[in-house]
Image: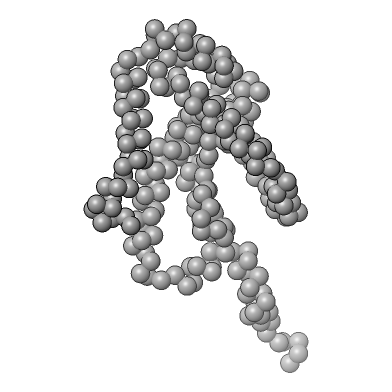
Amino acid sequence: MTGHTLNLSFMNPKRHVSLHNYFPFLNWLLNYRRENLTGDMIAGVIVAVMLVPQGMAYAMLAGLPPQVGLYASIAPLFIYGLLGTSTALAVGPVAVMSILTASAIESIGADSLEAMLSISITLALMIGLIQMLMGILRVGFLVNFLSHPVLAGFTSAVAIIIALSQLKHLLGIQIPREKLPHEIVIYAVQHFSETNITVLVLSLLSIGILIFFKKYLKFFLKRLSISE
């Protein structure tokens, strides 16, 4: 009967653990509790409300159509939900990557929407392959060698570049993308007379609303016993 023995290697506990390592969603899917469904659905709606305008804005920041940001916001969430292990990691387009994508597109000199999309897709694929290779080689420890001043300086510089890149939307004027940060300021001052007053008023009103909610929203939520 040895030659006809049924192979039950898939029942091996070690193989079972290995399967969970490759497909992490099995860890939470098989043990999911029904009472968590309502909270998860509310969290999903909140994330969607925030991610839709944010994804569109990041796509425009990269010089791509707004709908590209929606695709980049939806697909990674589904993939990471199945293959990821962190419950706190934010997945999707971010400002830094949008700036770097715009820089890559400009350096190649794409002159059409199709070319820009092809460059961004190729860039995303190459970065993904490099990150997979780095994960396999376990070289994430290299991040420990980046000092805080380097990270702080990089983050501050990116914040300034992002703010200046949105100046054309704030004033409602056309500013060439190839201009350097200080040239953007000079160009905006020189062409301030071309400012669209309606756009400027709406922009300032939006900024005011954001600042107001950032300062006082938590206070109102406490008064309504919604937040601790």
- Residue under the image location 38 percent in, 55 percent down: 43
Q: Position of residue 203 (x, y in %)?
A: 35, 25
**Residue 117 seen anywhere in this rendered image of the structure:** no
- Residue under the image location 45 percent in, 21 percent down: 167
Q: Does residue 47 sit above or below 159 in this rendering?
A: below
Picture quarter with the C terminus:
bottom left
Side of 186 where 227 appears, left or right: left
Picture quarter with the N terminus:
bottom right
Q: Does residue 74 sit above or below 23 in this rendering?
A: above
Q: Position of residue 76 (x, y in %)?
A: 53, 48
The residue closer to the viewer here, 99 or 16, is 99
Extreme residue toward the bottom, this view: 1
- Residue under the image location 63 percent in, 20 percent down: 109
Q: Position of residue 40 (x, y in %)?
A: 39, 60
Side of 159 where 109 appears, left or right: right
The answer to which image quadrant residue 34 occupies is: bottom left
Q: Position of residue 131 (x, y in %)?
A: 68, 47
The residue closer to the viewer here, 228 or 2, is 228
The residue closer to the viewer here, 221 or 103, is 221
**Residue 4 seen anywhere in this rendered image of the structure:** yes
Extreme residue toward the left, this view: 224
